[in-house]
Image (cartoon, rainbow, N blue to C red):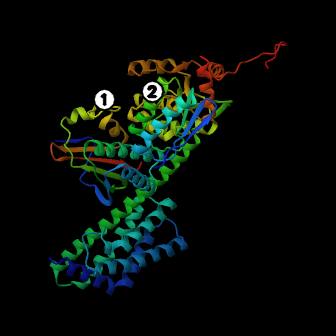
Amino acid sequence: MNHHDDASRISATIGKYQSELLEDWVANLKQQMIRFDAAAEQATRRHCSQLLELMCSALRQGEIDNIEGRGWDEVRHLLTEISQERARQGSTPSETAIFVFSLKQPLFTRLRTEHAQKTELLADDVWTITTLLDKLGLFTVEIFQKSRNQIIARQQQELLELSTPVVKLWQNILALPLIGTLDSARTQVVMENLLEKIIETGAAIAIIDITGVPTVDTLVAQHLLKTIAAARLMGADCIISGIRPQIAQTIVHLGVNLEDVVTKATLADAFVVALERTGAAIHYNKAGAKG
Amino acid sequence: MDRIPILRMGDLLLVTIQVDMHDRLAMTLQDDLTNRIVQDQAKGVLIDISALDVVDTFIGRMISNTAAMARVLDATTVVVGMQPAVAITLVEMGLSLPGVRTALNIERGMALLGKRYHE
Amino acid sequence: MTSNFGSTDSTEADVEIKRLPVQNSEELVMLRKHVRDLAVQLRLSLIDQTKLVTAVSELARNALKYGGGGEAVLRIVRNGPRHGVRLSLIDAGPGIADLDMAMLDGFTSGGGMGLGLGGARRLVDDFAVHTTLGVGTVVTITKWKR
């Protein structure tokens, strides 16, 4: 079967009945709309009209099977726009796909008229249109998913940035209080951030406090150790504080080697050690009040 | 041929590595440095690598060897200014710099060297 | 002899960007610059850029030292939504006799820190070595944008 001929034939059919197809399609969609919204109807009508136009010319170019090809660039572009807009407006992916699928019925009606006595031709064209619209519909679903994933990724990134605070405790001493479950990705970001801050503030010691961390797995423990090694290479040092009993057990079971690292039970203890190491000393005034 | 300049500050020598070193340059630096340590009777060497955005095993080896040579000549070497990305990469590769002390910056490096000779 | 330490998916597509000679130190410096530029262009994070360029530097030095110089082929590779930098280092040297040994830390035949290919491998996502004694070696590394 010559696909080029099929494509041109279908293109011709669409071209011939274009305005009627548009009306039927919009009517179909309107029936599915939950509430009447003039602006939405206008937008939908515009989309349908543009899509028909673009599909017609894409088909005229002869390509039917591959909607990823150049000939279908404009159609995909329009569908992407429509899909993203609907994603932003809160539609579901199905609603967007149904937008495309709703064109089937009006088209089949016109095909029946065109191929009144030619059943084989009718069957072929119906099949071609079905597969084509299925592909386009699925395409919109994929775009929709991609859009949503991008939004989620961006929000995750923002959350990550908000939750990695490095605090300057004192001259040359930084603290990084970690809170919540650490996963590999988050730990990496946090650690890189810490090293940057060490350079920025010229800190000699960074206290990594994990009081607020319920569990640690091998990957996270490895990231911690690598960060400490990197800090040392740079010329600073790290103290880990706030290791809970459960974490201590996990660390030993995992065989993680913390021999080289100073660990303290609390942030306060770690701070005292850090002060000593940086040459500071705490002095209390005689009257008993802290100085 | 370019040479990497070596600055003298009292009994310290300061080397700032700013270019992507190729082999000849690295060898020349080692020669120059060892000569200067003897000539100036230097007790300490500061190697500033804050401009290096890549340190591979060749450069790493060069730095370690330089520190070793300096030690034989009774001078202590401190490497300063390693960038975080470089540090993380070295750790990932499993490359340590044996026999090399490090400090965050020149000021800290000098403080470190000051402590060292009085030990 | 061939070793693959990562996936080579047949749904990948790559585009060659540049071919660069690696015959001396100056060309090594140029190669690093080109790789860095491409990594920046593809928006790899600073750490990933550094790891990639460092790995390239290691491989290129190997080619110079043991392979009599060689050629680097720089590509952009795509797999679905992912994209990344792929580099192949080709030399017509003696080949690597014991690949498994070469991949271990501490391996060296020419003196040095003895990290060989193992260190470089840890810096990248995909790593493949093809080597034939008396013919040459091709090492291909890939770093994906995360």
Tell me: residue A259, above or below residue C42.
above
Which one is in front, A33 or A120?
A120
Residue A268: x %, y % from top left = 64, 21
Q: Residue at x 30, y 58 (%)?
A: C14
Residue where numbered disc 1 is placed: C106
Residue where numbered disc 2 is placed: B68
Give the class, few, some or many, for how many residues have Cα within 10 Å of label 2's Cα (few <14, many ≥20).
some
Residue C78: x %, y % from top left = 33, 56
The N terminus of chain A sits in image quarter: bottom left
**Is label 1 in a helix, a strand or a loop?**
loop
Quarter-of-image position of residue A198:
top right
Q: Amino acid at mark 2?
A: Ala
Q: Amino acid at mark 1?
A: Gly
Which chain contains the residue that carries disc 1?
C
For residue A42, say whether it is visible: yes
Residue A243: x %, y % from top left = 53, 21
A89 left or right of C93 in image: right
**Is label 2 in a helix, a strand or a loop?**
helix
Residues at marks 2 and 1, CA–CA distance in whole angstroms: 20 Å
Tell me: residue B47, above or below residue A79.
above
Residue B73: x %, y % from top left = 49, 25
A4 left or right of B5 in image: left
Give the class, few, some or many, for how many residues have Cα within 10 Å of label 1's Cα (few <14, many ≥20).
some
